Amino acid sequence: MGLSLRDTLIDEPAKRPHSRARLEPLPSICKVAILGFGTVGKAVTELLCCSPSLQLRLTHIYNRNVDRKRVPWVPSQVRWTDNFDEILASDVDVIVELVGGVRPAGDWVRQALCAGKSVVTANKHLIATEGDELLELARKANQRLLYGASVAGGVPVLCGLEQGLAGEKLFRLTGVLNGTCNYILSQMQNEVVSFTTALARAQEMGYAEADPSHDLGGFDASCKLTILARVGLGAQPRPQDVYSRSIEGVEAVDFECARKLGCTIRQVSLAELRGTQLYAAVQPALVPLASPLAQVKDNQNVLITAGVHGGETVFSGRGAGGGPTSVAVVSDLVSISRPESFLGSPNPRELKAYPLNHDLESPRYLRLRAPKDADISYAVSRVLSESGVSVHSVLQQSASGSMGSAPVMTLEPCRLSNLEVALERLQKLEHCFAKPLSLPIMN
Ligand code: HSE
């Protein structure tokens, strides 16, 4: 059903009543419908209702069981509905998709484009998995599909890569791309709260995904890295190809040890072209305190691009939450409503299917957990050396407390494949009672 519907619609966009040529100006007032009245939907509604000078008029709000969502501050002319077909049949010019997820959001975006409506979305999961096809459909339908809010919230990274750095040959993108993880880790760094409390606060503030394991485990950032790798590097990874590790094993003791090394801990996203291969990973890592990666606090994000000609460029700002994300959504709406400011589709970088390689060498931090009185140092050294991994320095042999001892060491640069063999064996040692934590140390 889905496929045949798409095929029909792709072939026939010109027959649809609201279809326009690409540069044909929109009416002076651009009518907007919002799908999804959650944290971001509410914030976009506030911006649109408070900024009449922007030539954008909110006409419809869609939500499931819409009656429980109604708020008195939305002007009475705005129509609330739980029927998407009503919006499709209306004269709205742009549909803002904020329902999230791939289904039904993807089908609605397709239907909107084919009905002659442009689309603005904050949906990184959808763009990372079906973006190519949807952008092609938008092109065929002479509509625009903008997704600036899908990466880094209010920080204009996508237009920065597409337009500001169009002349650069980028080879590396390094960033902190998930506000929830950054909020948790920077709160833990300052010893303000525990992991669990920080996560609960991130959820209250509307930073976290409906399923927060998408934040913690790296899937959210993998979707964002996938989009960035395409726009910035011309690579085509899928979110599931990105090597990802959860931040959930990180404890207060790891921040203490990181500080001794002049570092802190962040969830780092890295996509790098190395020869003919692409390395793409999202994982907690030690980052030097002086690095821009360490400077981002709370819900902030940062992206550091590295290019052959111009070196490094840093983008940073608030990456999650209603306020920042609504700014990115409304900026895309303004771009659509002002065709005179439309530069045309930026020249996409030439896309290549780079094979992925995760087996890179890097120095590492290693922390174990053992009973307070157990001496596991000999067994640990033996496992490491048999796995081809050398210890660089021992930071602490043990730390007291109800959690037992926490031997911590740094490792000489080693391949991930060797390390994974060692970790599996360490976990099985008689006195190791928790999964060892191993983090790359970024330079
Ligand atoms: N859950 C996401 C984050 C929301 O924490 O970054 C913004 O994409």
Image (tube, rainbow, N blue to C red):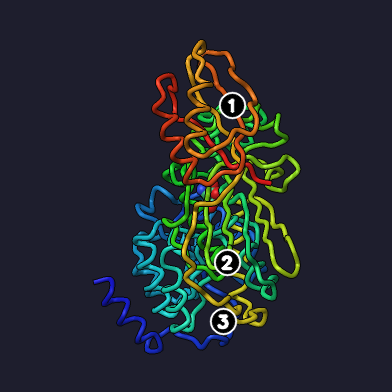
Depth check: 235 or 185 in front? 235
Q: Is residue 324 left or right of residue 226?
A: right
| Image position, residue 406 (x, y; %) | 55, 21
Look at the image and tell me in which quarter the N terminus lies.
Answer: bottom left
Q: Quadrant of residue 8 in the image?
A: bottom left
Instruction: Identify which residue is drawn at 49% across, 45% down.
Output: 215
Element at badge 2? loop
| Badge number at residue 275 | 2
Q: Is mark 1 within 8 Å of ligand 1?
A: no
| Image position, residue 30 (x, y; %) | 56, 74
Residue type, mark 2 in image: Gly
Q: Quadrant of residue 408 in the image?
A: top right
Q: Is residue 409 left or right of residue 1?
A: right
Q: Say whether disc 1 or disc 2 marks the residue closer to the N-terminus.
A: 2
Residue 320 vertical position relative to residue 189 in the rendered view, above or below:
below
Tell which tag, 2 or 3, sits nearer the viewer: 2
Q: Say whether disc 1 or disc 3 marks the residue closer to the N-terminus.
A: 3
**How far apart, in angstroms, are the residues tagged by discs 2 and 3?**
45 Å
Are there few (<14), some (14-19), or many (20+) residues within 10 Å of tag 1? many
Residue 200 vertical position relative to residue 138 in the rendered view, above or below:
above
| Image position, residue 46 (x, y; %) | 58, 55
Q: Is residue 77 at all visible to an observer of this figure?
A: no
**How far apart, in angstroms, are the residues tagged by discs 1 and 3?**
61 Å
Instruction: Identify which residue is drawn at 55% across, 35% down.
Output: 201
Residue type, mark 1 in image: Val
Element at badge 3? loop
Element at badge 1? strand
Q: Is residue 202 at all visible to an observer of this figure?
A: yes
| Badge number at residue 26 | 3
**How far apart, in angstroms, are the residues tagged by discs 1 and 2?**
35 Å
| Image position, residue 34 (x, y; %) | 47, 62
- According to the picture, the residue beneath numbered tag 1 turns out to be 408
